[in-house]
Image (spheres, coloured by chain):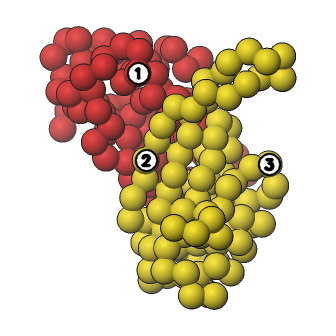
Chain colours: A yellow, B red
Amino acid sequence: MADDNVVFVGKKGTMAYVLAVVTQMNQGAKEVIVKARGKAISRAVDVAEIVRNKFITDAKISDITTSTEEISSEEGKPLKVSAIEIKITK
Amino acid sequence: MADDNVVFVGKKGTMAYVLAVVTQMNQGAKEVIVKARGKAISRAVDVAEIVRNKFITDAKISDITTSTEEISSEEGKPLKVSAIEIKITK
């Protein structure tokens, strides 16, 4: 899958990511993957729920997977964070 | 399913919920459902990841679903929040 079918949810407002997903789907993407790590996971779920309930009502959440990723903290120590991938399909 | 196979993740520390899941599985539960709403969703994913990676390595996350629930805010207004259910099976 091309990278432009992935929306990585971070610290912006929820609607910025909703708009990104909706834009990709309106441009013809049949599938968009919403990814997030750590505290942004809650926002990623909000994004997926808002997309399918308010904007693209024929879209479905077809798969959700979680994983644990190791990142480097600011002090260079390894740090484990949870990650989520939510696949939205229409 | 009996209610005692559900762990509802809230504002306590992550390990309190990990312990609740591990205890239920060690007492014979083949399946535990971890539920959370709103900002606690990130913590619920942490709980599931820690259970399967550190404590019960033969456990799997067999299903994850999300939904939107309507709750009443403190002022009595309806408020929509995202919710997650993570099914852990061994």
Tell whether B27 sits left or right of A32: left
Tell whether A16 sits left or right of A47: right
Q: In this view, does B14 lie above or below B10?
A: above
The numbered dot on residue A11 is 3
Q: Residues within 10 Å of mark 3 (few under 14, many from 20)?
A: few
| Element assignment for label 1 | helix
- Reading the image, the residue beneath label 2 is A65
User: Do the residues indicated by labels 1 and 3 lie within the same chain of the protein?
Assistant: no
User: Do the residues indicated by labels 3 and 2 lie within the same chain of the protein?
Assistant: yes
Q: In this view, does B4 lie above or below B84?
A: above
The percent position of residue A49, horizontal first and vertical second, equals 54, 64
- Kindly identify the amino acid type of the residue bearing the numbered disc 1: Asn
Q: Residues within 10 Å of mark 1 (few under 14, many from 20)?
A: some
Task: Tell which tag, 1 or 3, sits nearer the viewer.
Answer: 1
The percent position of residue A36, horizontal first and vertical second, equals 63, 47
Between the C-alphas of marks 1 and 3, the distance is 27 Å
Chain ID of residue with mark 2: A
Q: Residue shown at 63%/88% (left/top)? A: A27
| Element assignment for label 2 | strand
